[in-house]
Image: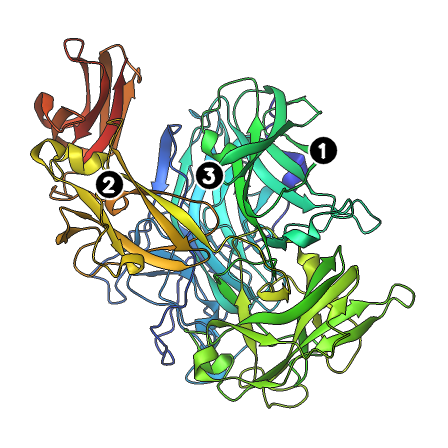
Amino acid sequence: MKRSILLLALLFIFILSYGQKIKQLSNFAPYSSEQKKMVFPTEPNLKSEGEVFFTETFNFKDASNPRGWTLPAGWQVVEEGNFGQYWVWRAGTDSIRGKFTFLPGHIYSKTPQDGYWVLPMDEYNYVDGISTGNYGMNWFQLPELDCSNHPTVIFKMSQYFRCCCGAPDAKMLVSNDFGVHWASFNMVYETGTNIFCKNPYPEANITEVAGGMAHVWIKFVWNTNSNYFWCIDDLSLSEAFNNEMQLEQSWLYMTDLEANGDEGFVYMVPAAQTGTDAFGGYTFKGGFLNAGRDDQEACQLNVEVFKNGASVYNQNSTKVADIWALQRDTFDITTPFVPDGFGDYQMVLTAQQKATDGRPANNVYQDTYFVTDSVYSVSDWDWETYSSTAGWVGGNNDGDYLGILYDIKNATEVNSISTMIMQRHDNPKASTQVGYGFQNWLFKLDAESGLWVEAISGAFTEVTQEMLNHWVTVPLDKDGESEFIQPGQYIAAIQTYHNGGLGADNSIYRFTIGSDRSHRYSDGKTKIRFVTGDTWGGNSDLSMIRLNLNNTGAPKNADVIFNVDMTLPIANGYFNPSAGDFVDVAGTFNTWDGSAFHLTDADGNGIYTLTVPALATFLNIEYKYRINGNWNTSEFPSGGPNRVYRTSFYNMINDIYNNGASLSVDLNSLTSSINVYPNPTDGEFTLSVTNAQVADLNIVVANIQGQTVYQNQVKSVLNYQENIDLTQFAKGMYFLKVNNQVMKLLVK
């Protein structure tokens, strides 16, 4: 498909004045250094990358400048409101401050050591105890980029933001005609108001507006929000792969095949609610993006479901289509999958095409749900963030309701409701306090009137210190009749009391519960209702309210299989199996005394395995791997973190020793990139090395026993290539080590 100079559908005109002067505020209110619990998503490891031809890690530190940093030449930083609220540089150890922001900085930065770039709006709008409501437009622009030698351009960065109190408005704009027209790329990615960004590692194919262009301008614009912040780091431009399909969106529907149709993803479903045709099962949908250079033929969605590790469903979409470069298409699988009994069900959605994909990791989305005996829940066990009664129009009253919609397929008895009661670590005053109260309710939709009516409730409960940041289960008050419910739609709700009365000041009074961001549950499942009215409205940030039924029968114990990849310790000599070294696992499940048996490597591939029998299901365990049973040679030494895992009906844990961090190796001798081809090999292969700067190379090839079979030292090189011959050695697994980086080699 022929590319135009500028994709007109994306363009809109900005008339902006370019300012060069940068101002900074010097007085800040006191702030907390505590960090709330967050999930740190990791960017997928790529098998290969297109050529990276531009990078920016915002290393603007300058000790000679009184403010501690200097903006490089060619940058533009503008704040159009003339309030002095500019993008600024911060050292990696510097926090973001303000009235509502208590954060340690850019938590998703991959290069925190050299600082990050931030627009600290909450900090600007709260100085010396005085709040203001000023907001953008605030923007910065990179120096002009020459992409004339790059026919395709992929943009990537790391970001962290939160916006309030308008709809998030954070964009990247690209121009190739000196700012006459701008193409807009939304960096929000479905993030709602007043919540943290859903995509910390955005990626966009900007070939249509930048590929082959000599004068490319890129700017980042924040608009219409006075509170919180936008952090940016690790910005890069690279060429695309020829074949690069992405599963850009995915949907997992629990479908009841009745009038109200698809219900969205549910994390835990009681088995008694899956046994009739009314349940319907799961159907699937995937949104594909062709982000590569070439058109892709025979594109199709595949879904495979594994029950306790065994495949029980494998379907392709009936639609098979070609997708042009930079175009999108959607694919459905309507043959429902119906679970069969208690267990872990892992659903794997894969975007497939005829060609071999350059980055297959982003073709796949997977999630797991459980068929339980009694727990009905849209969320998992662990919270990523929180939701509160603050800021709702007409809300934040004593007596407001937070709820989750549950469909009951078969008549059952209800026992209790569980809620994750939260007190924010970053700002305890703006969240649930000891002495606040709540009451659980179950509401049923009356099909004739369309109204929600009270079905059963629990006792009023006062919050204690022990409840904070834990699941709290309160029984429903049974009377021999109300607890037996019939098929229909129900809302499991918590009615919250913060002692602030009606329309309370949300900076003083608010009730907070946990929010799960690990799964793509339906927004329509989460509900709020103000005590001043009878209407239930939607809210996208609630999830951690469970309905517990009176059912039993699920397994109470299950085996846990521990697998740990020891190839890096073997390759660098830290772990030597031929000398008798062993690896074990110690944790809360064995009182940290170590496993009774050592992990073993029966097939000699460097992956060590041990099965620990009969641990309690849904038990939260902590553990570490150790070499020779010695805490001095354990993972994450010097008091580092423990690994954390929650058991379920089927447990297969795959770890890399010390998370792949090298031990007993000079970390200053880093190699930028190594490439080996072919791999697998018949014994002869080519090694290609690219350093970030001129450096010495120590090249070692070792067998699975850790014995060196080849070694070479090269002095002072930037780029290096050599052919290596291992044909005289036995077939099998080898490790190629270049300074502190290790690759597996398979000689066939």
Q: Name the residue under label 3.
A: 155
Name of the residue lying farthest toward the right: 448
**Does 170 appear above or below 597?**
below
Percent position (x, y) of residue 127?
43, 80
Quarter containing the N terminus? top right
Separation of marks 2 and 3 at Cα, in angstroms = 43 Å
**Does 744 appear above or below 436?**
above
The three-letter amino acid code for the residue at tag 3 is Phe
Q: Residue at x 43, y 40 (%)?
A: 144
Neighbourhood count class around disc 3 (C-alpha, 10 Å): few under 14, some 14–19, many 20 upward: some
Percent position (x, y) of residue 169?
59, 57
Neighbourhood count class around disc 2 (C-alpha, 10 Å): few under 14, some 14–19, many 20 upward: many
Q: Contact, CB < 8 Å: mark 2 with mark 1?
A: no
383 and 73: which one is in front?
383
- Tell me the element at label 3: strand
Q: Is residue 134 visible?
A: no
Q: Contact, CB < 8 Å: mark 2 with mark 3?
A: no
734 and 425: which one is in front?
734
Q: Residue at x 44, y 41 (%)?
A: 156
Rendered image quadrant of residue 675: top left
Q: Which of marks 2 and 1 is nearer the N terminus?
A: 1
Percent position (x, y) of residue 562?
33, 44
Q: Answer left or right for 303 relative to 414.
A: left
Q: Name the residue under label 2.
A: 599
Q: Name the residue under label 1.
A: 335
